[in-house]
């Protein structure tokens, strides 16, 4: 069936290093992807998005890469800081009965080691 | 100060009682959504509304009801028919369907 999944449920990174969070999707018809950050007890916060006509998009300290050939999405965070500790979700937009809805993965917990 | 507000942050109810969770947005967004999040899991869509006076069931609508009488407001009622109501409930909105969604701070509901 269709799904959005993450390769690793947890990731620990040394402060100042770069982080890479991966996500696999199975619906080749999906045309929009979003990364969210969720801190404990809070709602998800939009980080960055990418459409299927692109393979890379950069924001402030973050880069999202999309590989449509292998249906893989990644979020790169440069020079990670303690404030980056959170759960990161990828979300896939796919059509359902003519209306688009987001399907979320289960999340990767990123822990920054001081 | 624009955004999405949910109240209350914590809510406790006895089993068998209906409870309504509030969601308000002043972003002038047409679309609004309700999600449920269980510990260690992703978000699952309960209901969504594309426009005022319209709403559609999501993946797990059983035991829930919504209304969309105003553009700014999309309250969710958790009924006694919902078998496992204890969860973290998140409301979101987007300018229209198909665009990035912005989330409120969530309401943690505990039913005993």
Image (tube, coloured by chain):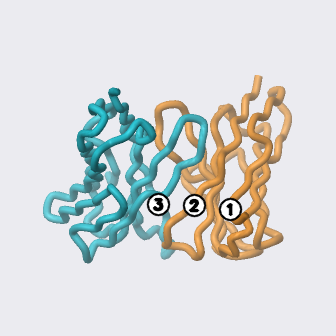
Which residue is label 3 attached to? A102
- In the rendered structure, the answer to whether residue A40 lies left or right of residue B21 reads left
> Distance from label 1 to label 2 (Cα)?
8 Å
Disc 2: host chain: B
> Distance from label 3 to label 1 (Cα)?
20 Å
Which chain did the image draw in orange? B
Closest to the observer, B99 or A100: B99
Res A73 → quadrant? bottom left
Which residue is label 1 attached to? B3
Q: Identify which residue is drawn at 60% across, 50% down.
A: B35
Res B9 → quadrant? top right
Whole-percent x and y of residue B48? 63, 63
Query: Residue pushed farthest left?
Result: A69
Marks 1 and 2: same chain?
Answer: yes
Chain A display color: cyan
Which residue is label 2 attached to? B102
Whole-percent x and y of residue B91? 65, 54
Nearest to viewer (mark 2 / mark 3): 2
> Distance from label 2 to label 3 (Cα)?
12 Å
Query: Residue pushed farthest top?
Result: B112
Whole-percent x and y of residue A31? 33, 71
Check the image and report above or below for A56 versus A20. below
């Amino acid at each position: 069936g269709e799904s959005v999944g993450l390769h690793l449920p947890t990731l620990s990174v040394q402060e100042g290093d770069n982080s890479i969070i991966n996500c696999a999707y199975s619906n080749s018809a999906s045309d929009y992807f979003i990364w969210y950050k969720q801190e404990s007890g809070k709602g998800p916060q939009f980080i960055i998005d990418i459409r299927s006509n692109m393979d890379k998009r950069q924001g402030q300290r973050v880069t999202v890469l999309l590989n449509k050939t292998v249906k893989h999405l990644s979020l790169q965070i440069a020079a990670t800081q303690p404030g980056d500790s959170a759960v990161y979700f990828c979300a896939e937009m796919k059509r359902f009965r003519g209306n688009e809805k987001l399907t979320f993965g289960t999340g990767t917990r990123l822990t920054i080691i001081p | 100060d624009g955004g999405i507000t949910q109240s209350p942050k914590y809510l406790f109810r006895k089993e068998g009682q209906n409870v309504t969770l509030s969601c308000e947005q002043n972003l002038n967004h047409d679309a609004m959504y309700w999600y449920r999040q269980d510990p260690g899991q992703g978000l699952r869509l309960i209901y969504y509304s594309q426009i005022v006076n319209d709403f559609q069931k999501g993946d797990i609508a059983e035991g829930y009801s919504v209304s969309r009488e105003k553009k700014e407001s999309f309250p969710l009622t958790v009924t006694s028919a919902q078998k496992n109501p204890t969860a973290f409930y998140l409301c979101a909105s987007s300018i229209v369907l198909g665009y990035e969604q912005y989330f409120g701070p969530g309401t943690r509901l505990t039913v005993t």
